[in-house]
Image (cartoon, rainbow, N blue to C red):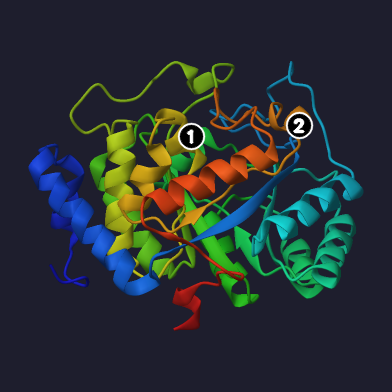
Amino acid sequence: MPVSKIDRSEILNWLRENDETRLAVLWRWADRVRRENVGDDVHLRGLIEISNYCARHCAYCGISLHSRELARYRMAAEEILDCVRQAVDFGYGTVVLQSGEDYGCSTEWIAALVRRIKNETPLAVTLSLGERPEEDLMAWRDAGADRYLLRFETSNRRLYESIHPPLAGRVSDRIFILKRIKQLGYEVGSGVMIGIPGQTYSDLARDIETFKELDLDMIGIGPFIPHPNTPLAVDTGMVSDQQVPATELMAYKVLALTRIMCPRANIPSTTALATLNKVEGRELGLARGANIVMPNLTPPAYRILYEIYPDKACIYEDREDCDTGLRGRITALGRRIGAGRGDSLNRAK
């Protein structure tokens, strides 16, 4: 099948496809596109969850401001740098600094941290810190940050606003922010949730088209997994055949279609997939279009408090065991561990 010939009706047909024989065609198609465009290397990104404070009231997330019972933490700079050094020792090419939208992590504090990482290591630095003001994004880019991740979650504006209340006095327009981040010179990553209550198949097809329109460098696909202590813990979605199911299978279908639509993007096999299927979730993601894995370097004492959804995979593994296990799983698939930073081939084009 040609890579470039896939339209809205074909996307919708694949999203609704449940025949295993037909889906095997989709898996092979996505895997071939992956192999021909980004190769067999699987790049490892060291994830560091630096803070679980968040100023937002997102209706599904376990670290949002409404989680009053949650013990909050904010890692010290030296604790973060210890994790960064571990990433270097493991041979990773990138660290990802992730947090809630935490304004206690000041503009200059993050900038100073980025400068130290860039001065002391060869690593690429990815930031995933929420909808920060443009002056923050500019300062961090000037400090040396290479990439920024901001998931738009759904291209349906009404649906987005229903589960992501904005901060007072601010408009939340992630599509606009992503375009601005690209203009600032970052590699840009985004993504969506699969199966948000009220999400239709047409919404999801539009999400996949939006990936291509934004010309993203990295795209994360994950199923909707609400935290039990949030308003969306009880499904209030449509009772109809238009509601997208929040299933492992649907996540794989979107991942595969995204690879076909965006052949040179970096696409991770996410922790959420490994949470739904702890036996082979990551492997199935890699076999159906993914080329990135993000082992968690957060110290276990903090990792258990970064509970955006329940029962996350690898929550109690130490860093060495996590690294060893992931490498074994990747090589067992006949894939290689990527060397270097793993910069976006989409951007390189």
Give percent across and percent down for residue 254: 31, 48
Residue at x 79%, y 74% (from the top left corner): 142
| Residue 84 relative to residue 220: left or right | right
The kind of residue on which mark 1 rests is Ser
Residue underneath mark 1:
162
SS class, disc 2: helix
Give percent across and percent down for residue 76: 89, 44
Give percent across and percent down for residue 164: 55, 38
- Furthest toward the bottom, the residue is 349
- In the displayed structure, 300 sits above or below 156; it is above
- In the displayed structure, 223 sits above or below 152; it is above
Q: Which of marks 1 and 2 is nearer the N terminus?
A: 1
Residue 338 numbered mark, or none: none
Quadrant in which the N terminus is drawn: bottom left
Q: Give 178 or 306, whichever is nearer the viewer.
A: 306
Does residue 155 appear in the picture of this structure? no
- In the displayed structure, 135 sits above or below 23; it is below
Residue at x 37%, y 47% (from the top left corner): 285
Number of other residues with Cα within 10 Å of mark 1, as a class: few under 14, some 14 to 19, many 20 or more: few
Give percent across and percent down for residue 57: 64, 31
How many marks can you see? 2
SS class, disc 1: helix
Residue underneath mark 2:
302
